[in-house]
Amino acid sequence: MAEAEKVVLAYSGGLDTSVILPWLKETYGYDVIAFAAELGQGDELAAIKHKAMQSGASKCVVKDLRKEFVEDYLWPLLKSGAVYENEYLLGTSVARPIIAKHQVNIAHAEGASALAHGATGKGNDQVRFELTYMALDASLKIIAPWRDPKFELTSREAAIEYAKKHKIPIEQNKKQIYSTDRNLWHISHEGADLEDPANEPKDSLFIISRPISKTPDKPDYVQISFEEGVPVALDGQSIDGVTLIEQLNQLGGAHGIGQVDLVENRLVGIKSRGVYETPGGTILVAAHRTLEGLTLDRETMHYKQQIALKYAELVYYGQWFSQLRNALDAFISVTQKNVTGSVRMKLFKGRSTPAGVKSPKSLYKVDLASFTMGKEYKPADAGGFIRLFGLPMKMSSAFNNDEKR
């Protein structure tokens, strides 16, 4: 009897992958190795090995990837300034490449010939997983059940019924069936009543942040120190990246910071509505941007803003392991050489605002910025500058006026 083909499944223990695991065995006879990545999901992974084995996995590999996630994914993302469509801080997008990378590694270690994921056929995640697979080992077979004609569990209700039939423990029920994704950087909420953009998110939806109406009436302040664009300390105390984000999530979450309700443009051409909670990330992005304002020259800062738009697309589109992102990281690293200093942030009623910034690399000079004229700046010089700067407009205006005569 031929040995069953081994497949490594990206396994979260959520509804989709909980039913996909036994479905892969039942439908095709695969030997399923479940892989769960610890990226800061709280207690979601507490019993995941038992659940995976109970659901039919031959093996379950759980890896704590939080340190790698912060240092190799979140910090580059933060330094880039990337934000998708003005609001989304890319919490789910940036997590998929690290999961897919370790899936490939496990496939090599276990002698598996295939990789599987539970992303839907309408979503972005299928692209993010599969582009990473292709970039790291194009020889591995890709299994996407949601695109398989035999897969009939294409609604939350059908998946819940399948789970009950196969005695698979799940947290979702038909009354509350939000699709959520959680890691250190954020938590996302989709589906159910959120599918109608006219519906306001319920207060009960929020998990790591309070509704604004229930936040304190007194602000908190936190000082974040950076070295070359990387956060290294809170309130003067050195701290590792994982703990830093966890503490900022608690501080920011208490004040309702980082709540985003967004209708976004998916890569596959569909508009979708998601509600995101990113308290720590929102504070860090605002603090980092403030420090860059003090330490980057105008031309570099303005060009970097253009780069950030492209970087956000690359992350959102699943092109983390592309040559272009590597090239942009090289540019960004140069821009961050002087992004060193500390920023004091005020946390209050859903807002994270700068309350003071300082840097040994500051380009801001009080004497030069002052309205009081000093010897280092001669106002008369501005006249010649303005005449030369405006010369193209002057010539264009004269030409247009001549044509009107």
Image (cartoon, grey):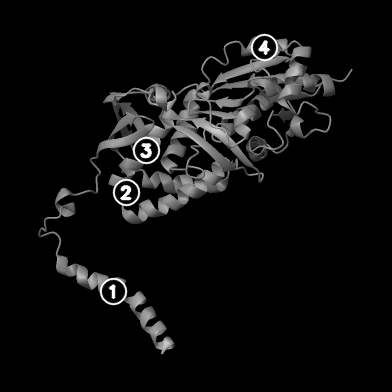
Marks 1 and 3, how far apart at CA: 36 Å
**Tag 3 secondary structure:** helix
Q: CA distance from mark 4 to mark 1?
A: 72 Å
Q: From the viewer's perspective, is the residue at label 1 or at label 2 nearer?
A: 1
Q: Residues under labels 3 and 2: Cα distance?
A: 15 Å
Please report the residue visible at 15 percent of the width from the left and 65 percent of the height from the top: 379
Instruction: Give me the C-alpha separation between circle 1 and circle 2.
Output: 26 Å
Task: Read off the residue under disc 4.
Answer: 51
Q: Is residue 351 above or below residue 382?
A: above
Helix, strand or loop at mark 4: helix
268 vs 79, nearest the viewer: 268
Tag 3: amino acid: Ala
Q: Which mark is residue 296?
A: 2
- Mark number, residue 286: 3
Q: Residues within 10 Å of mark 3 (few under 14, many from 20)?
A: some
Q: In this rendering, would 159 be left or right of 326?
A: right
Residue 348's place in the image compared with 301, above or below, is above
Name the foreground residue: 181 vs 9: 181
The residue wearing badge 1 is: 388
**Given this view, does label 4 or label 3 mark the residue nearer the observer?**
3
Which is more N-terminal, label 2 or label 1? 2
Point out the tag, 3 or 2, that comes first from the N-terminus: 3
The structure residue drawn at horizontal position 25% and vertical position 70%, both measured from the top left corner, is 385
Q: Position of residue 361 (x, y in %)?
A: 25, 43
Q: Nearer the viewer, mark 3 or mark 2?
A: 3
The earlier-in-sequence mark between 4 and 2 is 4
Q: Mark 2 belongs to which amino acid?
A: Leu
Tell me: 26 left or right of 83. Answer: right
Q: Are marks 4 and 1 in contact (CB under 8 Å)?
A: no
Mark 1 or 3, which is nearer the eye? 3
Residue 197 percent across, percent down from the top left: 58, 37
The tag earlier along the polypeptide, 4 or 3, is 4
